[in-house]
Image (cartoon, coloured by chain):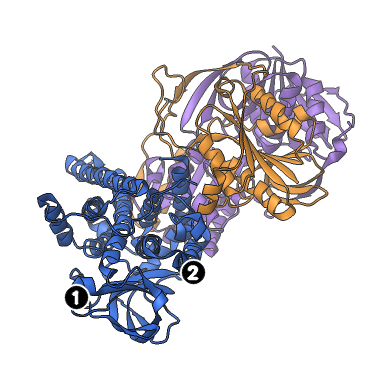
Chain colours: A orange, B blue, C purple
Amino acid sequence: MKVVTLLKVTPDTETKFQINSAGTDIAEDSSIEYIIGPYDEYGVEAAIQIKEKLGGEVISVTIGSGNEEKSIRKAMAMGVDSGILINNADLKSSDPLSIAKAIKEVVEPLNADIIICGKLATDTSDSFIGPALAALMNIPVISEISSLEVTEEGVVATRDAAGRKERFESKFPVILTADKGLNEPRYPKLPMIMKAKKKPLDKKDTAGTEIRKNVTQVKAEFPATKSAGKKITGTPDELVSELVTGLTTKEKIL
Amino acid sequence: MSDDQKILRESVRDFAASELAPNIPSLDVKQEFDKSTLTKFADQGLLGVSIPEKYGGSGMDYISTAIVSEELEYVDAALRVIISVHNGLNSMGLLQWASEEQKQKWLKPQAEGKRIATFGLTEPNAGSDVAALETHAKEDGDFYILNGSKMWISLADVADNFLVFAKTDMSKGSRGITAFHVEREMKGFSSGTIHDKLGVRSGNTGHMTFDNIEVPKENMIGELGEGFKIAMSCLDNGRFTVAAGALGCAKASRDAAVKYAHERKTFGKEIGQHQLVQRLLANMQQGIDTAELLIWKAGWMKNMGIRNTRETAMAKWVATNVASQSADDAIQIHGGMGIAGGPDGYPVERFWRNARAARIYEGSDQIQEIMQGQYAMGYRQDKPLRKELPKWVPS
Amino acid sequence: MSIAVFLESYNGKLVKAAKEAIGVAKSIGSDVFGIAIDNNVDAVIEEAGKLGLSTVKAAAGITIYHPAMYSRIIFNAAKDADVVIFPGTVWGREISPQVCVKMDATPVSDIIKVVDASTFKRSLHGNKIHATVKAEGKIVLTVRAGIFDVPELGDGTANREEITSEVAEGDAMIKLAEILASSSDRVELTEADIIVSGGRGIGEATNFKLIEDLATELGAAVGASRAIVDAGMRPHSEQVGQTGKFVAPKLYIAVGISGAIQHLAGMSSSETIVAINKDEEAPIFKIADYGLVGDLFEVMPKLIEAVKAAKKSA
């Protein structure tokens, strides 16, 4: 089984951001820690589990602009066998369709049985690459999966869709996007961290890919904070009475 | 930090936060050591951080051992203590002093996490005054007959292997001390647990007794009478982990204090807005930055193969005091809440209790102070040793 | 400007996010048509008409969802449109990129505000940053669910235009093999007007009954904080927050939730927020319109009774 995992490296979800002086984006800050996107990490874990069950290899593919190598090495320390880093800072600021096309150029020749990535990039809030790649490669996609079973014949995956559980069956090749709940990503063991340094990482250019910048970010701002809350104290009866009165007369919800 | 060190830090932090941290407050209250912690450490590869791959370790640099210690004590000192005795005092001691055959036989299973190790130097009547050891080993054919007892031994009740220091010549003071590798299975070995400690209550601390144990001669580490030098160089590594752990405790205290200072309001504003609270936090940060630099300096010297007894001792002295003061100030910032611990309370009183003993063990504040004074005056100088800790060679 | 909107429906009923998407479409321009695919497409067309659409392109007789087939049908119906709008649902997020590829259009996903026909606000970095983006060319939009208003119901009717679907090579590679109805008949989180959520303060899984009982009385959905999902007490499908669902109901009741920033990111856009927590320093109180400082085990039973009584007298 050959599994390709797509890794996007994103600022740690705990990061406190500043806005740049132009007011168009978050400020560049060398103190920002970059991590494997949380949903992509579920994809990495799933890929490793598939390899552990059925054998084969796991290759990770990343678009880069300079902050990626540590995260790729971490994925290798988890069990990924080799990596491809597409170094192209222009690409990172292009629109998601150009990125999907660049990934296709690299991934299609690998002839993977399964391509897996996260359902969402937490930094840009895009959930685009997986399904777009499916359309570009003309292969099936099952997105936002929370359970997965892989056999030699194909995959069975389930997901939550608006309160229903949908169970899909697909043959290979197939693209999957991972939701939380699919697995618990492992922590790299120490000996694996050292072994990861010796795994092959192929750095590629994508000079041939057309880079389209059809989306321009013109402004970045902090969300308006909700006005300060109102605390109510008293006995449980008083609390409930004040709340119910408020919800019926003022908010007119009840 | 290198990429390996960053990945290591992330990995140990996540591991400790999810696998270990949730149980600590209740284990601390119950004074219970959770043996599965050792299995988890072994599985993660934490028991052989800086031991070369050929001896079963991960072959990471010495600073990595500090990173592991720091991240573990960020959660609780009891977790870091395992690294101090197993990795620092024992395994790195074997790495430095044991013969190739001994390393393959004893160091390798330790680094792989198959055998848990600790260190037996301190006795009821011999703490800072090492030369006052009463445990003795008498030559008898192919054996040394070991008699005596040890006190304040971390993991005394759970370890398999012990690096024990005993007098082989009662007339010679510190030059009459020899180091031996002792195993729990040896006839005449017994151990017990010490309860009701101030801190490190979820850690195992105990005493052990040797009753006519026949220790084979090939279990001697180093040469006859070389024990004092070995013990002191083991402390260079043990203290390094204690210092790094204390840094973790200080950072945990600071983070808890900052969080609380944002949440708690008095006189109509977050208490962090009050300048006297800011002063406490500024002092913590000053200490943390200082301790961190000292630890990294000592670690760098170890990596380069430069003797670092003075620098490591300085790091230990400063860092343990920073931890103690930071935990104390963190309690102050928490006000009354600061003294309420346990599973439903705040962690800072546990940090405070944990931080205290580190200013006594592995060289008390006073010993550290005297050492630095003697170095300054030139009364104390480090002579080259017969065997040095090998410098780190990247694999 | 021609605007297409995918009318996601299930068993003849529009999902709430699709109604919101209709509202977004109408706020961008007047030349709007819907695209419906359903086994009971007539009902969908009728509902869309009432929500103000005059034209619906409809593919009838499709009994089961298939991502590639849906993408093809929507592409064929929408390829001449300037803007194609999808609801921010699992289906919407799965189909929209495929339609975007076929149209070679510009994707703008997960918008939270329309500035003008080509300028939108998006929420980035787990709602820590809001960004305004300008897009060129044909645009494929997905709309974050729960943010936009549903248009008011009128008495309009929509014209129906038939669209066809063909099976394509490759479709047989994948199938939706089974749909398991949700185990409860409770309203889904992202569809709900009222949500009752429980957090760490609940203590044990069995105490969650208090949350469920209040939700039942209010006809509300049930949510949970990350802490208790991670503890295995509730399924991930109920998690509200940065790594769970983003919700913005009319009323959000947070019970025993301290209000970690990741949780607040997922629910702070709710219209009215009620918090019940015994720790008066809990961050949730900073955003709660009604911050009840008290023991949830004392307050909740009384609140459930009070809601019952209020319903009777209404």
**Local crowd at mark 1 within 10 Å, few (<14), some, or many (≥20)?**
few
- Residue found 37% across the figure and 65% down from its top: B90
Residue A203: % across, % down = 60, 30
Q: Chain of mark 2?
A: B
- Label 1 resides on the chain identified as B
Q: Is residue B219 above or below residue B312?
A: below
Residue C252 higher or lower than B146, as above or below: above
As displayed, is residue C35 above or below residue C177?
above
Q: Which residue in the structure is indicated by mark 1?
A: B172
Is B3 situated left or right of C55 in this image? left
Give the residue type that dot 2 points to. Lys
State the residue at coordinates (40%, 65%): B98
Mark 1 belongs to which amino acid? Lys
Badge number at residue B105: 2
Q: Secondary structure at mark 2?
A: helix
Question: Dot 1 lies on which element?
Answer: loop
Q: Using the rendered view, name the quadrant where residue B99 is placed.
A: bottom left
| Closer-to-camera residue (C257/A82) | A82
Q: Residue at x 36, y 42 (%)?
A: A230
Q: Residue furthest top?
A: C1
